Each structure stands twice: as C-alpha cells, then as structure tokens.
Image: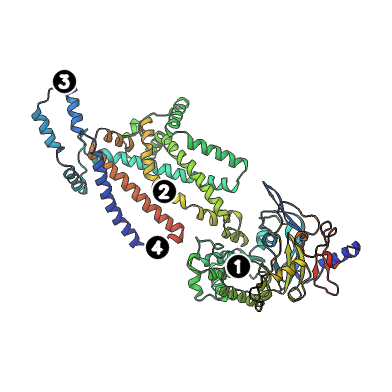
Amino acid sequence: MTNAAATGTERTNIQIVSEDDVVRVEDLRLSFYTSLGVVRALNGVSFNIPRGKVLGVVGESGCGKSQTGLAIMQLTFGRIEEGRILFREFNTSEVIDITKLEKNGPEMRRIRGNHISMIFQEPMTSLNPCYTVGHQIEEAILLHQTRDKAEARRRTVDILRKVGMPNPERIADSYPHQLSGGMRQRAMIAMALSCNPTLLIADEPTTALDVTTEAQILDLMRDLQHEIGTSIMFITHNMGVVAQMCDEVAVMYLGRVIERAAVDDIFYDPKHPYTISLLRSIPRLGIARGQKLESIKGTVPDPYSTVPGCPFHPRCPAAIPGLCDTVMPEEIFIAGSQTHTVRCHLYT
Amino acid sequence: MINFIARRVVNMFFLLIVVSFVGFWIIQLPPGSILDVQIQRLRMQGGNIPESMIQALRDRYGVDDPFYIQYWKWVSRSLQGDFGTSFETDQKVAERIYNRLGFSVTLSVIALVFTWLVSIPIGVYSATHRYTWPDYIITFIQFLGLSIPGFLLALILLITASRLWDQPIGGLFSPQYADAPWSIAKVLDFLRHVWIAIVVLAIGATAGLTRVMRANLLDVLNMQYIQTARAKGLKESTVIWKHAVRNAIHPLVMALGTLLPALVVGETLIAIILSLPTIGPLYLDALRSQDMYLAGTILVMLSALLLIGNLLADLLLAWVDPRVRLE
C-alpha cells in the first residue's frame, strides 16, 4: 500500500512463479447476468497449478471455487469478462489461452475430457442413468483416444480395475443405479482419468460420501495422481481433506484468492484473518469439552452488492477502520517467502 | 422378460372380463331396451301390434332374461368369435365393427406417429432455445392448439380446403376405390380423405406433448450427468439427443398407453363432422339406441386397446430406461 510500484512488481512476479505450471489463471473475472441483477462471481482470481501437484481450493459456499473450476472447462453459464486461463498439455510447449477458445468449439471439446477432466460432487446424479457405466467411459475414450471399439472396451475394463473395482467386466455392464455412491464416484474417477488428463478438476468429490468411503476415494486419487502424474485442482470446503490431499492451497473469499501457500504454511502459519478463523472453526481432538467451537461472525454478503475495500472487512476481527473498508488490498508475498502470498493490509 | 409379458397378458385377460361385465351392466341400466325403440317405431308407422307379437319378439331377443344371463350368453358366444347380432340392423356385430375399428386404429396410429414426430423435435428446440423469439412463437402456437376445440378446427379446415381445392367431403374413399384392392393410389386416396381428421387429432395432443417435452428437457438439462457429458468433450448435439432426450422422454412414452384409446374415442366428434365411417359415431349410436351387444363389444375392444397400448408403453419404457427393467 505504501509503495504501489513495489507492489506492482511483486504482482508480476507472482504470475511467472514457475515455467512448470500446467494451468495459470490470471485475473479471472466472471459475471452472471440474471433478471435480479449482475452477480460478480469471480473478481480477479489468480493462481497456478504446478505439474503433478495437488492444489486445494477452499472457501465457503458461494465464494466462487466451483465456478473457477467450471471456467477452466468453459462449462460455466457465467460470462468471462476479463483474464486469461493459460493451459499447457503434457510434453508440449504450446500454451493455450482457454478463454480465447469458442465455448463449444472443436478445440475446447478436444481439451475437455481429454487434457482436462472433471469430477463432480454428486456421484448419485453425475452418471447418466440410461447407459451402462462401461458405455459412458468408452464414450470418452472413443472420442479422444481410439476409434477401435474393442480397444476402448479393453481400456475401460483396465481403468475400472485400476480404480479398485472388484470384477471390472461386470461393473462395466452395470447401470449406475446398480452401484453404490462410492462405486459411482470410482466410476466417475475412472471416466475422468480414462484419457490420462494433464489436469483433473475435482469439485468436492467426497462431500456426498460417508467418511470411510471418503478416505478410500482420497487414497485412490492420491495413488493414481502419483501413478499418472496428473495435476489436481481439488475444490473443497473441508480443511481435513486439504491436509490429507493437497500440496498447495488457495483460500478463496467472495470471488478472490485471499491467501496462497504450501499446505504446511497454511496450517501452521496462516496469515489472512479469514484463513485463521476458518482453521479455528474446525473441531479438533483434545479441545476442552463444553468449549464452544469458534465460528466466523456474520455471513457472506449479498452477491448482488459489492463491498468497498477488502471484501472480508465487515466480518474481520482485525479490520483497520479507514483503510480496510476503503482500499482493496493487493496480493503480496509474505516477507521471506517465495510461495506464500496474502491479500491483507495487515502485511503491507 | 417373457415371463413379465406373459403375466401381463394373463392379467389383461382378467381385466377385460371385469371391464366387459361392468360395461354390460351399465349399458343395460337405463329403463327400456332396443325392443321398446323398435315397437315405438312400428306403432309410429301406424301398425297395431298385437300383444302376442310383442311377447314373441321379447322372447326372441331375450330382453326379459335377467342381466347376468344376457351377459353370459353374450360372453360365451363372444369367446367363440360371435359377438352377437346388432338389434338395430340385424347385421352381425363383428361385421359392423371390424372395418370401422380398423380405420379408427389406423387413423389414430397415424395421428400418434405424427404427434411424436412433431412434438419431440419442437419440444427439444423450444427447451434448448428457451426465452428466444422462436420459443415464444412456438409457445403461442401451442396454446392456440390447446385451446381451439377440435371440431371447430375440423370445420375450418374442411371449409377452407373444399373452397381452395377439390377436397372430398365425407367418406374414406372415392367411389372408384371403395371396393378396389389395396394399392398406392388407394392409400393416397385414403389419406386425401382423412388428412383433416389426422391433423385435428394430432394438433391437440402435439401441443400438450410439446409442452411436456420442453418442461422435462429443461429439468434434465440441469442434471449433473449432462454436465458430465459436456465435460467429456461431447458435441452439444450428442449431449442433447443422446444424453438428455432419452431421460426426458418418459412421459411421452407413458402417454402412448393412454393416447391410443383417447384418440379412438376423441375422433368421435370429428368423425361425425367429417362424416367418416369410423368406430366413434357407431359407438355413440349404439349407446343411444341401447344396442347392447354392439355397445358392449365396442367397449371391450376399446378397453383391449387401452391395455395393449399400456403394455406397449411399458415395454418401450423398459427399453428406454434400464431402471424400470425387471430383473
């Protein structure tokens, strides 16, 4: 804040963190035009996902984490107003700006399901009830990898075996309603990984599952991620899952990334007041019985309005009057760190 | 599956017996009988009929028998293919019905196919182009189609067509084809006679089904698996026609079961207006003159159509949606 020029240079530094990123999202702005008004869902989201790493994207409902994932796939119904989504496939140097591609055009469809694939939150409804699981996986393989039906079938059974399905041939001929929620999510993962994607976007893949199944699915994703080398953008609101799965974390609030760091830094040295409160609101073992769990006071502001200054200031315990409610903080590096950034006036 | 069909057919048989019994009972409920109508007519013509002759007629027609005996006589013969004799014309009921029923079913099936062929694509277009001008225009026409009574539309079309070109009025065939064997020319002649009836029959049903298709597809398009299909990289047309329509088509398939008999009965008024010799007007006459064997047989035939239509719909639905298949 005191030195605008310095902040500016730091910002550019952030954007070329590494040549080894598979995706770099830069200043992404996304709006929904509804009959009630304009909802600004994303207000300048920037982050990068390094090759072979898992980035956790966390935040409350409505903070824009799912929309960021959908925007990378160009599957959002909102309009991308500004910003770039740079994507680089495996083993190529060619960088594609996804926002420049036609939404349902051939180039975008070539990327979808092939280089970037996605898993959704609801395993119960994310498979088409009218087709067998095998058919739905084959569909993606036939579209991107091979035209040979027998070969597609063989690969389908292979990938089903890989995701830990007992009797993969039988599962391939089953309809989704014949499988449990955990099995369906395995089938979804099989479908998403069937073309060895560069990036997997997992939008709360375990939220709808019970904890035992959740643990199995997370293990499976970790294993396959090591095996295939896919980068994962792991969208969740569960900090426990983040600790288990992720290498890096981006904390989002109201359509902005407000803190980014390696997973250990987020848990042991959180900087942003929002991240701190988020971590305090997790129930822990060893906490005194009867002690009230902390919650973040207030609620997320109405999406149709815009908050002046830092979007978190109305709920922030450390808000500085006259500063936080008027000036939007820039994203800056924490002193002495090359990877930990925060958007907060307390650190400028 | 064969087991399922066999069970359904047996059930259908028992259902038909119940329907025929209840139907027959209702038909003979009003006081009087076909005989009274005929005696009345003879008296009007000035004849003085002796009491003994009336009694002879009563015995011959068996109208004084209790209702269950009448029913038994009719059913036991029906099972042998003899549906009895129409009181009114002294013709065999089977003769009077078969031709007409055949034409009615043909008309209805053509109307049904027409309805499907039109309402599915229009419904899909309307849903995928929601809140655009074409959607508004389609919606407007649909409400028009729903709200214009069929008989009025039939009259308008008939008058317009006969003014503008040589539209034959009444009948199913031109005289030269009436007794000719079936040929392409005869089929074309048939269509020339009945197209108005088909259009009128289809329009009401089409308007309704298009709305249903649109609403259902809109629901399905919000489902997660549609997003999954898109995320796979499928073309939008594949997403719509392969993944969405198949899930949205259930009500249309189910409508098949009830639509067939509804169309057969629905054509009554239109057939009367267009003077088409189909089953509807015959049914109405039979009920009015208490020609009970005739009316009863038509009722049973219509019920059979309903049951067959439902069976077909169930089979089709099982083919479309694996979730309703019986293991």
Inter-mark Cα distance, 2 to 3:
52 Å
Q: x, y percentage for residue B252?
A: 46, 49
Camera-nearest residue between B323 and B166? B323
Identify the residue under disc 2: B256
Front residue of A126/B270: it is A126
Using the rendered image, report if marks 4 and 2 lie on a common chain.
yes
* Residue with the most extreme bottom position: A286
Chain letter of mark 4 equals B
Among the two numbered marks 4 and 2 on one chain, the one whose residue lies closer to the N terminus: 2
Report the amino acid beneath label 1: Thr
Mark 4 is surrounded, within 10 Å at the Cα level, by few (under 14), some (14 to 19) or many (20 or more) other residues, namely: few
How packed mark 2 is, by other alpha carbons closer than 10 Å (few <14, some 14-19, many 20 or more), is many
Who is closer to the viewer here, B119 or A248?
A248
Of residues A325 and A64, the one drawn nearer to the viewer in this rendering: A325
Residue identified by numbered label 3: B46
Q: Which residue is mark 4?
A: B326
- Marks 1 & 2, CB-CB < 8 Å contact: no
Q: Secondary structure at mark 3?
A: loop
Q: Cα distance, mark 4 to mark 2?
A: 20 Å
> Where does residue B10 sit, x and y in percent of width and height?
28, 56
Using the numbered discs, state the Cα–Cα distance from disc 4 to disc 3 in whole angstroms. Answer: 67 Å
Mark closest to the chain's N terminus, 4 or 3: 3
Q: Are marks 2 and 3 on the same chain?
A: yes
Q: Which mark is residue A207?
A: 1
Q: Earlier in the sequence, mark 2 or mark 3?
A: 3
Does A221 appear above or below B10? Answer: below
**Residue A198 visible in the picture:** no
Q: Is B46 located above or below residue A328 in the figure? A: above
Q: Are marks 2 and 3 in contact (CB under 8 Å)?
A: no
- Which residue type carries mark 4? Leu
- Cβ–Cβ under 8 Å for marks 1 and 3: no
Type of residue at label 3? Gly
